[in-house]
Image: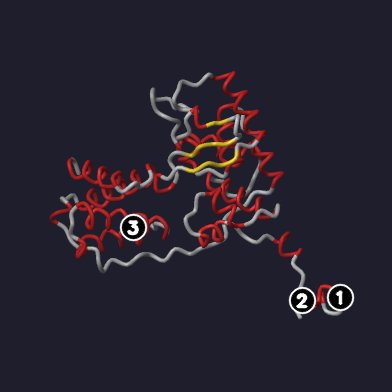
Amino acid sequence: MGKLRDQMIEDLQLRNYARVTCKEYVRCARAFVAYHRRPPQEMGELEIRQFLMHLFEQKKASPATRKMHVAGIKFLYEVVLRRPEVVAAIPWPKVPQGLPEILSGSEVMSLLEAVDSTKHRAIIMTAYGAGLRIGEVCSLHVDDIDSQRMMIRVRHGKGDQTRYVPLPERVLFLLRRYWIIERPNKPWLFPGQQRGCPISDQTVRHHLSVAVKKAGLTKRVTPHCLRHSFATHLLELGVDVRVIQMLLGHRSIRTTVRYTRMTSRLLAKTKSPVDVLGTPKQKMIG
């Protein structure tokens, strides 16, 4: 895509899209162009539909994957090429909203104990302990950890928004141990193999996968599963859902409700109004 790729990246950055989103949109647009081996300026709705059907029929891509490709291609035509009419009739794939995998507290402990490297245990514990997205934890700077105020500054949240989340004592203890052992080069708290760059999310996913197998967990555990577990565990501990919304960095409460779930433990604590009939609590319902 050449210059068009550079323009797309620039347009994404000017609109404060998250780093991971920029990467995925560009990847999806390049896949579309590579499939037809023609410049996008020479293509239209027909070629887009052919590519999306290729993802559906040949690649057996999931609805979420196809939705990401639609988003990238729509951005390419609507913003970069300024031809919104080309993608106006392209439908969004319906993505089923199933319940995510949630780890129990004992499963989280088993997972953390199965991580051999202090560095990667610190990354995984920080992700779970603060409810961070994988891109957020990888992008942390050394000076984002405020041990005086016991807060973590999250610089690159979704939409490139900055927020603060509490720094758990157990996370701070492990980070200090990691600091003594590794002495990471600033500014990155978790530097990667490439000099001057943070650790990649692929590396974190790899070490997480190894730890999952070592711990003997049968659930599908991803970095986002840790975030789901964080939110659900807070809900089980009685934290208000609006507080959880702020910690997760969600703009809409509806997103938070989708990310958390009412577990059987909470449901079991919910009393039916029939149980309060004839008791002092009946006055609460008239």
- Tag 1: amino acid: Thr
Q: Secondary structure at mark 3?
A: helix
Give left or right: position of 184 versus 237. Answer: left
Q: CA distance from mark 1 to mark 2?
A: 11 Å
Q: Residue at x 59, y 52 (%)?
A: 244
Q: Amino acid at mark 2?
A: Pro
Of pointers 3 and 2, the one earlier in the residue sequence: 3
SS for tag 2? helix
How far, Cα to Cα, is label 3 from label 2?
A: 50 Å
Q: Which residue is mark 3?
A: 55
- 10 Å neighbourhood of mark 2: few (<14), some, or many (≥20)? few
Q: Which residue is mark 2?
A: 273
- Rendered image: mark on residue 63: none
Asked if residue 45 lies left or right of residue 167, the reply is left
Vertical arrangement, residue 96 with respect to residue 245, above or below:
below
Of tags 3 and 2, the one toward the viewer is 2
Picture quarter containing residue 186?
top left
Quarter of the picture holding the N terminus: top left
Q: Position of residue 11 (x, y in %)?
A: 25, 47
| Pointer 3 local density, CA inside 10 Å: few below 14, some 14–19, many at least 20 | some
Q: Which mark is residue 279?
A: 1
